[in-house]
Amino acid sequence: MYGPCPKGHWMARLPKSKFGPLRPGRRYEVVQPFDDYDRVRHEIGEVWTFLGHNFLPHDDGLSLFVSLDGEQEWHIRMQWRPEEQGEVIGNLGAYVRPVAGERGRSLWAGLFGR
């Protein structure tokens, strides 16, 4: 996991796009621990807002962009190979889930009280 970086550092250049069960602007909680490509452990209870993703097919590299505080951006690097994070990526819904009571709420709704 790399960061923090100022708001817009990555997302100003990338489209806000969903990935599997993850939707931009929604908050997610880690419900099963996992290690990312950089060997950073994401523990149960870690909460972040999903911003978007990028995929580099040459190295099976998946980048998840998240915000822990709504202001700064973090980069969670993963590799879609069985010996790396393939299990986590392929079953992402078993590792992270929408924060209870916020399903369908967007980041913008949270910021503006809607």
Image (cartoon, helix red, strand yellow):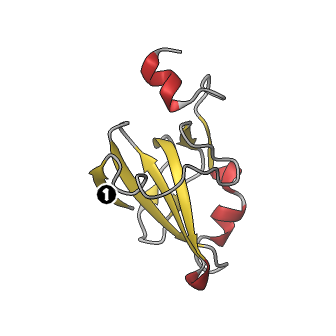
**What x and y, as percent, mark residue 74?**
38, 54
Work out whether residue 62 or residue 114 is closer to the camera in this orientation and state it: 114
**How busy is the neighbourhood of tag 1: few (under 14 within 10 Å), some, or many (20 plus)?**
few
- Residue in the image at 31% along x and 57% along y: 3
Tell me which corner region of the image, top left, top right, bottom left or bottom right, holds residue 85: bottom right
Q: Is residue 72 left or right of residue 45?
A: left
Identify the residue position indicated by label 1 in the image.
Answer: 3
**What x and y, as percent, mark residue 61?**
55, 74
Work out whether residue 31 or residue 2 is closer to the camera in this orientation and state it: 2
Position of 63 relative to 66 (above/below): below
Tell me which corner region of the image, top left, top right, bottom left or bottom right, holds residue 106: top right
**What x and y, as percent, mark residue 94?**
69, 50
Kindly identify the amino acid type of the residue bearing the numbered disc 1.
Answer: Gly
Work out whether residue 22 or residue 40 is closer to the camera in this orientation and state it: 22
Work out whether residue 12 or residue 18 is closer to the camera in this orientation and state it: 12
- Residue in the image at 54% along x and 58% along y: 53
Position of 8 relative to 81 (above/below): above
**What x and y, as percent, mark residue 10?**
39, 57
Where disc 1 sits, the SS reads strand
- Residue in the image at 43% along x and 58% along y: 13
In the displayed image of the protein, which residue is found farthest to the bottom? 58
Q: Is residue 68 left or right of residue 63?
A: left
Position of 105 relative to 112 (above/below): below
Report the quarter where the N terminus lies.
Answer: bottom left
Position of 25 relative to 59 (above/below): above
